[in-house]
Amino acid sequence: MRRRDFLAAAAGVAAVVANPASALAATEQRPGAAGLPDLNLGDFPVVARVRARKALEHLKVLSDKIGPRIGGTESEHRARDYLVRELKSLRYQVSAQPFTVPDKYLARIGQWQAGASRFGSLGVTVKAPFVEVVDGQLPDLTGKIAFYVNAPVGSAHVHAAIERGAVAVILGRISTTANKSSAFSPTLDRNVTVPVIGLAQVHTEKLRAQGSGELTITTTHYPNLTSYNVIAERPATFPWRDNGVVMVTAHYDSVPGSPGANDDGSGTVLCLELARVLRYLPTHKALRFALWGSEEQGLLGSRHYVSQLPPEEIARIKGVFQNDMVATSHDPATAYWLLSVDGADNATTQEVRAAAQRLGYDPRVHGPVARGSSDHVPFHEKGMASANFSWRGEGGPAQLEPIYHTPEDTIRDNISLERLQVSLELIGAAAYRLATQR
Ligand SMILES: [Zn+2]
């Protein structure tokens, strides 16, 4: 028996002693699997212990309680504090790594979050009745809020509404494709003297259905922002011989207006649950969990992290498992995609594929195919084995759920516990196996 087999066996035995019922259950067909599992000894302590329900408790805090987590703002900082506290309570070495990010322009309209135009007035509250402007027919808008749905490109309609007396302008969008529109910060050709806000589709539809009534709009400019990566690490079981590091990662920020339950609260709580389960299992490699800030603004957190890694640290990183959108309940998203930047296999995609074969999930796993758009990209660019893992449609990884990046990305509307459980088992088994290798 080689050393790593011994380690895996020891871990497996420990699991049986600690929890005989669940270890036994690990040998049964997995939820949504095509067949019976054929686990190796190292899989048992992971598969028998990971619980989507435990991850869901964290998601309730991040998505329901905190809600949208906008990079660099106080909402993201609240999430950071929660993650630091939870990971410290698991006895990891935890740090919050700061980096500066661009200003944000946000709005509130009643209880909804929207984007504010940086060309409109900021730091103001307007309370007034709204009127939908139809077919460019401008009524007298004195003292009113002008509401446009799918306004033409350009700024002329905004200027026209203000000339007719509008005290604020709401730009709503209803998408003509399957994907619903997000909140946005409207761009104008010059500064105007009233607030101008960009509303998500679901709120546009609600406002239209409401027809009339008084609204309260507040716009806020957030300058001088600092966003944070949360990094948690534990050493290898035998730290006197350095075999490198395995990273399991996700981003914890979300886009304006979206409570980010699936994008990417799901990946974040997967990391927390795997941090719990893997904490005391024997490994030859160190384990590092990284939760990125400000991914939605262009991978800012992971780019910052990679940019400050010295070459000897880059050489130590043996695999980066990024988990972005790992629990959608959207019916057609039945494919679990292995997404490497260049479409080629690497240590992470190979381990997840192998774990899928052992667990009986193989028919649901697709790829690797080439796709960026998440925090695995900066690692790939510096030559580290990395990939993103995510549930999407069978037709390709561009087939995201229609409510992606919208206010409807909530636990209620967009989280499947079964898919979260499969994601936990796949990444847990794969990352653990890579971590037990020398
Ligand atoms: Zn994401």
Image (cartoon, rainbow, N blue to C red):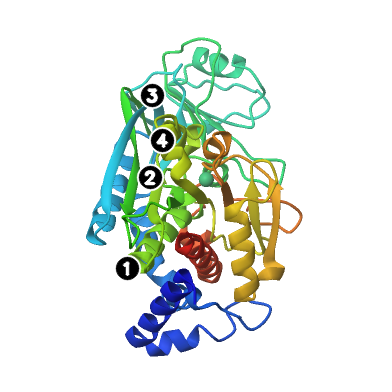
Q: Quadrant of residue 95?
A: top left
- Residue type for callout 1: Tyr
Relative to 359, is 107 on the left or the right?
left
- Residue type for callout 3: Asp
Residue hosting label 1: 280
Check disc 4: other Cα within 10 Å, few if <14, some if 14-19, many if 20+.
some
Measured as percent of width and height from the top left, residue 355 is found at 59, 68
The answer to whether residue 408 is above or below residue 119 is below
Name, please, the residue furthest toward the top: 190
Check disc 1: other Cα within 10 Å, few if <14, some if 14-19, many if 20+.
some
Q: Which of marks 1 and 3 is nearer the N terminus?
A: 3
Q: Which residue is drawn at 62% across and 50% down?
A: 346
- Badge 1 marks a residue whose secondary structure is loop
- In three-dimensional space, the C-alpha distance between marks 4 and 2, rounded to whole angstroms, equals 35 Å
- Badge 4 marks a residue whose secondary structure is helix
Relative to 367, is 13 on the left or the right?
left
Residue hosting label 2: 111
Residue 103, label in figure = 3
- In three-dimensional space, the C-alpha distance between marks 2 and 1, rounded to whole angstroms, equals 43 Å
Measured as percent of width and height from the top left, residue 35 is found at 67, 81
- Residue type for callout 2: Gln
- In three-dimensional space, the C-alpha distance between marks 1 and 4, rounded to whole angstroms, equals 26 Å
- Badge 2 marks a residue whose secondary structure is loop
Residue hosting label 4: 305
Measured as percent of width and height from the top left, residue 325 is found at 54, 53
- In three-dimensional space, the C-alpha distance between marks 1 and 3, rounded to whole angstroms, equals 41 Å
Nearer-the-camera pick, 304 or 2: 2
